[in-house]
Amino acid sequence: METTNGASRGDAYAAAREAMVRYQLQRRGITDARVLQAMREVPRHLFVPPEWRDEAYEDRPLPIGEDQTISQPYMVALMVQSLGLKGHERVLEVGTGSGYQAAVLSRLAAKVYTVEYFATLAERAREVLRRLGYDNVEVIVGDGSLGLPQYAPYDGIIVAAAAPRVPPPLKEQLADGGRLVIPVGDALAQDLLIITRHGETYQEERSVPCRFVPLLGQEGWDAAC
C-alpha cells in the first residue's frame, strides 16, 4: 500500500532518531536506558525551525533564533544522564531554548520547571510542548541565573548555557542529594561540571569540555555580551 508523504516523512524521522541513539549516544557512552528511550521518543525535528528539520538529528547544535541554539543530541543526553533521574524528581532547567531538552526531561522526572531569558523563545517552546502533550513542564520567562526559588528545592538542576562561575542561588536551591549539571568557563570554552549536594557540602566532578552560548542574567554574563 502506498504511503502518504507525511507518513513517509514520519518514518524517516523515526529512523533518524534510532540512528541518532545508536551511533551518537550509545557508542559514546550513554548507557541509561530511560534516557535512551526518551531520546528515541521525543521528536527533535518539531523543536527546530522548519528550515532545519531535515538536519534535526545530525550530531551538532542548530540555530533557533535570538542567537541561541538547540544543543547537540549527545550533549543533551550526557547532561540529562548526569542527573541520574529515577522518575519521582522535581527538576529545574535553566535555558528553555527550543523546549527539546525540557521534553526529554519530562519523560524522566515528575515535574519540570524551565526558565527562559527570551520571551519569544519561551512562548514558542511553551506552544510546542503544549501541542505535543508534555503537560508536566512549566515554562517561565525570567533570569534563570537566579534559579526559581518559589518552587525549590530541586532534585536536579540542569543549565543549558555557559556560566562564568557556578551561580550561588542554583546551589542553594538544590535539594540534599540533588545534582546540578552546568557548563562553566569563558565565552569560548567550558567544562561540564556535575555538582552533588551533601548537606552544606558540594562535591564537584569535572565531566567533559564543551561549548555553550552564554548564560545571561545577574549571575551570568551581561546581556550585552
Image: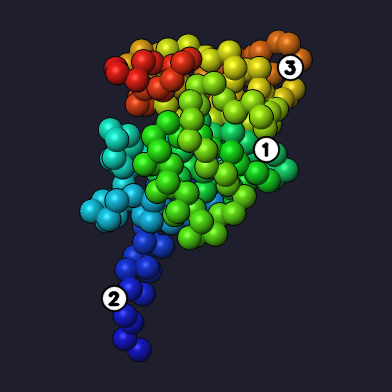
Residue 194 in view (yes/no): no
Q: Amino acid at mark 1?
A: Arg
Kindly identify the residue that appears in the image at 36 percent across and 15 percent down.
Answer: 222
Q: Which residue is mark 1?
A: 90
Kindly identify the residue that appears in the image at 59 percent across and 17 percent down.
Answer: 169
Along the viewing direction, whichever of 25 and 191 lies nearer the viewer: 191
189 relative position to 74: left or right: left
Proximity of marks 3 and 2: CB atoms separated by less than 8 Å: no
Mark 3 residue element: strand
Q: Amino acid at mark 3?
A: His
Which quarter of the rendered picture does the N terminus lie within?
Answer: bottom left
Mark 2 residue element: helix
183 relative position to 106: left or right: left
Vertical arrangement, residue 128 with respect to residue 208, above or below: below
Q: Please identify, in this view, whether the residue under mark 3 or under mark 1 is nearer the observer.
A: 1
Residue furthest to the bottom in view is: 1
Percent x, y of residue 166:
52, 14
Which quarter of the rendered picture does the C terminus lie within?
Answer: top left
Within 10 Å of disc 1 (Cα), the crowding (few <14, some 14-19, many 20+) is many
Q: Which residue is mark 2?
A: 5
Q: Earlier in the sequence, mark 2 or mark 1?
A: 2
115 relative position to 19: left or right: right
Within 10 Å of disc 2 (Cα), the crowding (few <14, some 14-19, many 20+) is few
Q: Amino acid at mark 2?
A: Asn
Percent x, y of residue 9:
32, 68
Q: Earlier in the sequence, mark 3 or mark 2?
A: 2
Task: Say how many tags the image has.
Answer: 3
